[in-house]
Image (tube, rainbow, N blue to C red):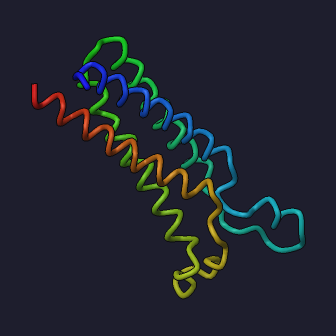
Amino acid sequence: MSGGSLRRTRAVVVAATAVAGVVALVMPTAHALSDRLTDIAPGPELDLALRLVCAVAMAAAFALAWVTLRRHSDEPLAFATLPGLIVCGIAVRYLVRTLPAAAEVFPSAEVRPALGAWLLLGVGVLLTVMGLAAGFAAKRR
């Protein structure tokens, strides 16, 4: 594959990953909906402020992918590492708070994180990896 083809592939992966991140933010990150429909107190949910930070990070990653496609350059995409690290940090913080193994530290830890939380972590990891790959590609030139 040529450099331009790899650049386009990386940019498309980052754009698709950012869209998947928005889907993960819309999905409940804990089984809170079913808890709210019963008399059980709802489990911990990703705070609105953290959701907004993740949404801004997704918008930034999408914009970086778009700029990469427009400028035919890997340099903007290298900055996708930063939104990826932010999303990873938020997702890991949430998962550590809610994983069952942390029951001694957090009483609410019996709540199992839903698919949205794991998807958000995967999005953060993929954005970080794509940003690093773009950074190394730009450095090689």
Q: Position of residue 134 (x, y in %)?
A: 25, 33
Is residue 75 positioned above or below 126 on the image?
above
Seen from the viewer's position, the closer of residues 75 and 72 is: 72
Q: In the picture, residue 110 is in which quadrant?
A: bottom right
Q: Residue furthest bottom?
A: 104
Q: Quadrant of the N terminus?
A: top left
Measuring from the top left, give residue 62's x and y in whole percent: 46, 28
The answer to which quarter of the image holds residue 46 is bottom right
Residue at x-position 55% and y-position 52%: 119
Where residue 10 sits in the image (x, y, percent)? 35, 31
Q: In the orientation shown, which residue stands out farthest toward the right?
A: 38
Q: Residue at x 46, y 37 (%)?
A: 57
Q: Locate the C terminus and report the quarter of the image it occupies.
A: top left
Work out whether residue 85 or residue 3 is closer to the camera in this orientation and state it.
Answer: 3
List x then y, in percent, for residue 81: 32, 41
Residue at image position (18%, 31%) is: 137
